[in-house]
Image: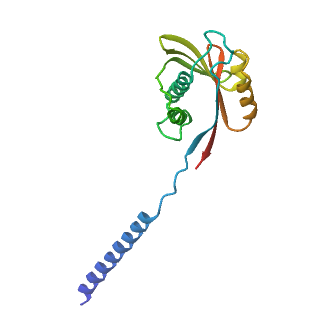
């Protein structure tokens, strides 16, 4: 009985260890991973001025053209920064938000080709844009640098800039040295 009981006890101990390791691995499997928080962005305000210099010929741009310009530059910036196509990327998500907003206004959009996009921390994003058989110079950035590189802002854009100070991420779109739009985004980590 001594030799056989030794082997049977050893076998029981090994079986007990296996059961305990199975329980600990199943316990590990049941533990829910902590959800990863991601940034969610929303468009808090959008000001578009189609005629910032009044009725001056060659300076009036229609809403669909301006929405298309905003979406095209946001998509190009997203690619420049190699942002993943998900909602935690500001520029990728802003293009999606603007597309939805344009659809709600029943505007038809076009893709404008953005060429030579660069970023200068003191100025913002600048590029050439091809649209409707014409070439445009665009600047997209914070209000102060864009104001230095453009004509004086229309009063609606000036008011939007002043009311958004310290309230999220803001951008002004200038096309050929004229500011046409102001955007303010808010971001929340959820």
Residue 154: percent from left, percent from top: 72, 21
Above or below — where is 37 with respect to 177? Answer: below
Name the one closer to the observer, 176 or 50.
50
Q: Residue 178 sits in which quadrant?
A: top right
The residue drawn where x is 71% and y is 30% is 160
Above or below — where is 92 with respect to 40? Answer: above
Give the side of residue 155 with respect to residue 169, left or right: right
Give the side of residue 42 with respect to residue 130, left or right: right
Residue 33: percent from left, percent from top: 48, 58
Q: Residue 43 sits in which quadrant?
A: top right
Outermost residue toward the bottom in this view: 1
The residue drawn where x is 60% and y is 47% is 189
Above or below — where is 145 with respect to 42? Answer: above
Above or below — where is 168 with respect to 28? Answer: above
Residue 161: percent from left, percent from top: 72, 29
Q: Residue 9 sits in which quadrant?
A: bottom left
Give the side of residue 24 with respect to residue 143, left or right: left
Name the one closer to the observer, 88 or 152.
152
Its colouring scheme is: rainbow
Residue 143: percent from left, percent from top: 70, 25
The residue drawn where x is 47% and y is 11% is 133
Q: How many marks?
A: 0
Q: Quadrant of the N terminus?
A: bottom left
């Amino acid at each position: 009985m001594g030799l056989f009981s030794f082997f049977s006890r050893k076998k029981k101990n090994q079986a007990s260890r296996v059961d305990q390791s199975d329980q600990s691995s199943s316990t590990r499997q049941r533990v829910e991973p902590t959800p990863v928080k991601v940034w969610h962005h929303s468009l808090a305000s959008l000001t578009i001025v189609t005629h910032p210099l009044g009725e001056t010929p060659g300076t009036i741009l229609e809403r669909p053209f301006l929405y298309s310009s905003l979406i095209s530059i946001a998509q190009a910036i997203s690619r420049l920064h190699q942002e993943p196509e998900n909602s935690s990327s500001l520029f990728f998500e802003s293009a999606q938000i603007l597309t939805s907003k344009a659809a709600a206004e029943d505007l038809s959009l076009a893709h404008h080709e953005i060429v030579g996009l660069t970023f200068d921390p003191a100025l913002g994003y600048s590029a050439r844009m091809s649209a409707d058989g014409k070439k445009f110079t665009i600047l997209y950035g914070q209000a102060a640098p864009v104001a230095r590189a453009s004509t004086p802002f229309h009063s609606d854009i000036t008011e939007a800039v002043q009311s958004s100070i310290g309230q999220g991420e803001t951008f002004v779109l200038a096309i050929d040295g004229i500011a046409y739009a102001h955007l303010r985004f808010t971001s929340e980590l959820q």
